Image (spheres, rainbow, N blue to C red):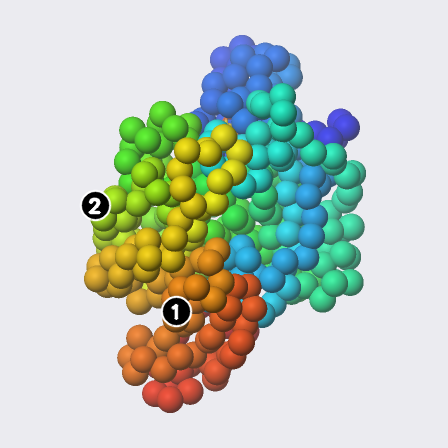
Amino acid sequence: MNGFTGVGELFDVLDGRSVRCRACAHQCELRDGMSGICRVRTNIAGRLYVPFGYVAGLQVDPIEKKPFFHVLPGASALSFGMLGCSFSCRFCQNWSSSQALKDPQAGTPILECSAQDLVEQAREHGCPVLVSTYNEPLVSAEWSAAVFRKAKEAGLRCAFVSNGHATRRALEYLRPWVDFYKVDLKSFDDRRYREELGGRLSAVLDAVEDLLGLGFWVEVVTLVVPGFNDSDVELRGIARFLAGLSKDLPWHVTAFHKDYRMSEAPDTCAKTLARAAGIGREEGLRFVYAGNLPGEVERLEDTFCPSCGAAVVEREGFRVKADRLKDGRCPKCSTAIAGVWK
Ligand code: SF4
């Protein structure tokens, strides 16, 4: 440990004093003294120093805000974030922490803390779940894992809210401690991923498949941005891909509002979300939700039994209005609903 850094575990030593980071799919090769694309992982004399021992954001959120709709409805989640991201999205809603060290206008105060401090705060606030979120958690995977080790000892569940631009090795590393993993699938266009977000579509698609194969509970979010990713073709591509992996994979299509450096696109309307959700259902997805426009999207915030159509969980925004599940099953026809309900 050295200030707010420690020696990481997700890297390989190359020849001389170079290293290759393995935390995200960029897999940056770093000569001595260099930092990666995220700017928060640095090679110092052949060892990779990574974020450790601080938070740059900490608050209690409803788990529905992450959003996880098939995990412990109504539970509180202690959410913590650090600095840095492997992407540079112009519409980032957490840019002050994610783009810190890349954008001189970004930056947010940090607070020193230990893993035990975070676990104690979760217990004090009655949170059964700890979530690494706000910035991209893969860039600080080792610190999150240290927190989650303590959290597991205390009987808590743990989650990642991530852009999904992961390596298989990082996901295997996290698997013992991370129960729930949310992936932002931001587009189905590799050119856009490369030029406008700063990553590769194939890496994110591979990670979603790996996450399911490794047994994480996964939910996928697409922030629908008019003119960027809202064409029928692109939304259908995403939905078809997800349904091909699992029809039980929840897909959240959420509304964009102007943020950070994307001011030219209009805010997403309820009609566009309804169109996206319709495409998701046509492709066979059983659980499609519309987010960020509470109360404006008819029944697209609720969970319905895929067998008999009964409303099993009703929501408005992040609030659970009714949870009728009985041991994770539909109260009318007893069909098991995919998710982690208790
Ligand atoms: S986390 Fe990703 S962006 Fe950061 S150094 Fe590692 S490979 Fe590069």
Query: Foreground mark, 2 or 1?
Result: 1
In x, y percent, where is residue 269?
A: 38, 53
In x, y percent, where is residue 55?
A: 71, 41
| Disc 2 residue crowd, few under 14, some 14–19, many 20+, Cα 10 Å | few
- Name the residue carrying label 2: 233
Seen at 29% across and 79% down, the residue is 307
Amino acid type of the residue tagged 2 in the rendering = Val
Residue 60 disc label? none
If you read the primary sequence from the N terminus, does the residue marked by circle 2 or circle 1 appear first?
2
In x, y percent, where is residue 107?
A: 67, 30
Q: What's the CA distance linking mark 2 and mark 1?
A: 24 Å
Tell me, yes or no, whether the two marked residues, 2 and 1, touch with CB atoms within 8 Å. no
Seen at 65% across and 38% down, the residue is 82
Which quadrant is home to the N terminus?
top right
Seen at 47% across and 75% down, the residue is 314
- Relative to 338, say whether 20 is above or below: above
- Name the residue carrying label 1: 298
**Horizontal placement of 290 versus 191: left or right?**
right
| Disc 1 residue crowd, few under 14, some 14–19, many 20+, Cα 10 Å | few
Confirm or reject: label 2 Cβ below 8 Å from ligand 1: no
Seen at 47% across and 66% down, the residue is 295
Mark yes or no: residue 196 visible. yes
Between residue 159 and residue 163, name the one nearer to us.
Answer: 163
Which quadrant is home to the C terminus?
bottom right
